[in-house]
Amino acid sequence: TKEEKKDDGVMAEEEPCMFWIWAMASTIFRLFLIFFFPENINASSRPELSTPLTSLRRLAEGYWLKQSSLSPYAGSMYHGSPLLLSILGPLTIQRIEGKSSHHLCSLVFVIADILSALLLRATGQKLQKAYRLNLRRLGLLTSLQDRGILPCGDIAALVHLWNPFTILSCVGLSTSPIENLAVIQLLEKVFLSILDENPAFGRVPLAAFGLVMATHLSLYSATLAIPLIFLLGYGLDAPPVKKFLQTRHVGVETTGSTSDVSKQDKLTQTTQLFLWRTVLYFVFWVLVWSSYVLVLCSLSLKQYGGLEEMFKRTYGFILRIEDLSPNIGVFWYFFAEVFDFSRNYLLIVFNLYILLTGIPPLAFRLKHRPCFLAFAYLAFSSILKSYPSVGDAALYLSLWALFVNELTDMEHSFFIFCGYIGFSLLSPVMHNIWIWRGTGNANFYFGNAMGYACFQYMFVEKSVNAMLNHDQALKKATSEMTKN
Amino acid sequence: MKILLILGLLLCYSFVSSSGDTTIHTNNWAVLVCTSRFWFNYRHMANTLSLYRTVKRLGIPDERIILMLADDMACNARNEYPAQVFNNENHKLNLYGDNVEVDYRGYEVTVENFLRVLTGRHENAVPRSKRLLSDEGSHILLYMTGHGGDEFLKFQDAEELQSHDLADAVKQMKEKRRFKELMIMVDTCQAATLFNQLQSPGVLAIGSSLKGENSYSHHLDSDIGVSVVDRFTYYTLAFFERLNIYDNASLNSLFRSYDPRLLMSTAYYRTDLYQPHLVEVPVTNFFGSVMETIHTNSAYKAFSSKISNSKSNPEMPLNQLSEHDANIPNDELKNEKQKCPYSQMRADLHKKLEKLENVDTVVNLSIAVMVVVVMVSSSLLR
């Protein structure tokens, strides 16, 4: 273990310098874009960046409505949380020396991005340690110098900072950075204690808080409850170990020291049980935090219809897909151009599609890897969301980078990468052709959106395949070792 | 409980269906009729136009004024001042200015049209500007001037309106609830006889002369060549020219201002059908349009919650009895609900929350507290 720490120390010394340099560079780049090119980019009017849920202009409008003693949801402009309104609202009004008014908010988003990057780094470091530890427990890492393992924390953080999607959604005046921050801090809080042996009850309230805030800001983060429950229920150590313990159990007594045996016995005992107590404690804390948040929301909205109005205008708006302005999703076209007469049926189908075809199969397949399951859920829901934007893509791409160690063998990654770049660049072109020049029509833009969704789906599929292949390979390797 | 509801509703209906004391005064109308034509009756048109001007000045808009004139003075070939009508020899005031809206002119001023205006029984094609669209909250001023006699009024030298006809029309108006209060002012010879037959409650009538007396013109304008105003109207206008829209002069002071020696006739008014005391009734109830505004604290706080918090609760005017009666059954229901302690607690909580002036600061503070707690606990647990 001492040598492990030395190795970690050696590697850790070189990396942070480069990491911090790159992080500072990306911050400077964002500030440069915010202060020097706000009009040229004109990012806030792009449908790919600002959706009815995340647009900062709508938030400013909602805040102004609230200041004029009207309901912030009047006129179907603002559809977000009233708490976000009271935090970001005053910032949209204050100006810096005559410049355009949203610079302060852009600074807030830059800070949110930096925080997300730091949290990703911490999460990645823990994941990396857990991965190394598990491989060592499985006996697959014989050499003490495990240079093959990439520092996924740094990579994920840098991917997050330098991803053009995150930069654009930060500069483009959408509240996606804050939503992403909420999700990332949720993951970080839970996975903080990956290495702890004791089920740390202190983690559970924080995890519950994270889940409540993430769901409050964007509805589809509620799907993250399932990986959280898996993580809490199966114990807070990294789950890949569990699957292989049964095959390993037989061969333990022949190899390894006594300390290894006792450790593995302990492992077999704890991970077979699903810790219902922790899960119930978690549910209790979720209820506590959600009631606190709901009381605050009802306080701030008590003159304007209260909680019912809030639910109708935020979650109801998301589920009923009331706004049909084009975005990079696939639903607006169905309702605006084709199937308005069967709207109710299609609404049910679209909403159930995520619930039935997305969540349960992935849960069955990946229940031993809750962190990756979270990534899969986020990616899946960002394809089939009511109002997707590139901010969602930014989030799941950063989370994907946390798993570079396991996903190195992803198939067709270059093809998918090119597809992403191509469709993201074509999207504003098609939008321009359709809306501004009039030489194209909605089919152009929708075709682009469909291609983008197709590539997103391929991405998720290939990642999941790669992860499952990786687990298969591990299983094969351990069974070979036991034979030996 | 249902029986109480039904009884309460019956009480309401009984209150409402009684005389118009329970309705509130919501609008003012004026019907100004000049029943003469021909050049030598210049003063009658000047009378009517002066009163039109006064009534407009004090607040009644054109859409609430029905002006019936023969309208043959201003552009008469004998008028030395074309398109101008004066009511004084000093020619200071041109009554026929830019914005005179005559609703019935020339040969349309007939007894039939007059009665149709009063009773509201028009043909379908009659436009709204020619209709008296009053309702049960209206105060109507009816001013008539021209040549009259014992219980009649001459219309356009061809017809006459009898006092019975007028009383009949007023009775119809009362049945159809077309007015809350009606003031009839007549400036003709033997004017007081015209409202001998009136019996409807809520009518106040004043005439410029008694039976057997003539009403005289005030002065002759040697430039125009005819008398330009009648005495009664002249002194009425003298009273009103001193007023503006905010003054509180009462009808009593108006009626007391008529001096029989100056008028050379007795201005007789009849108040037996009119319940309110003349001392308490402001002239603007009929001659102007000054409405009582009721403040309510409803949704709009007008950009600043600090200003509106100092407003007190609205006071109910005295004549909102009908609404108060309608509230009785509802209050009983509320009382029964409040017996449940849970809802009472909730009601108390709501009252307390309503007293909180700055909900936003509370919300912001709680968010800040939440974030701080979370950050502290997460740093402690590292």
Image: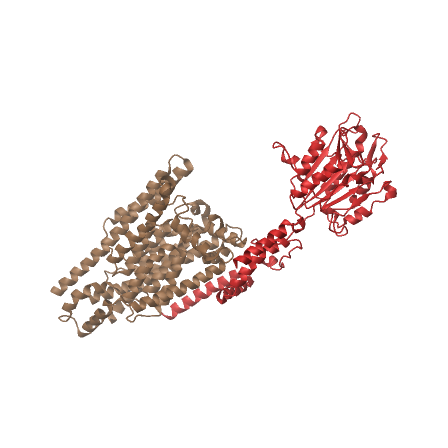
Quarter of the image for residue B198 reads top right
In the image, residue B73 above or below residue A262: above
Q: Position of residue A180 (x, y in %)?
A: 38, 56
**Chain B shade:** red
- Residue positioned most to the top: B77
Q: Position of residue B376 (x, y in %)?
A: 41, 68
Q: Position of residue A351 (x, y in %)?
A: 34, 50
Residue B178 appears in the picture as rendered: no
Residue B120 appears in the picture as rendered: yes
Horizontally, is A108 left or right of B191 in the view?
left
Q: Position of residue A117 (x, y in %)?
A: 36, 58
Who's the residue at 78% across and 37% down the image? B151
Marks counted in the figure total 0
In the image, residue A299 above or below residue B125: below
Nearer to us in this view, A142 or A184: A184
Give me the chain that's brown: A
Who's the residue at 41% across and 48% down the image? A51
In the image, residue A57 above or below residue B42: below
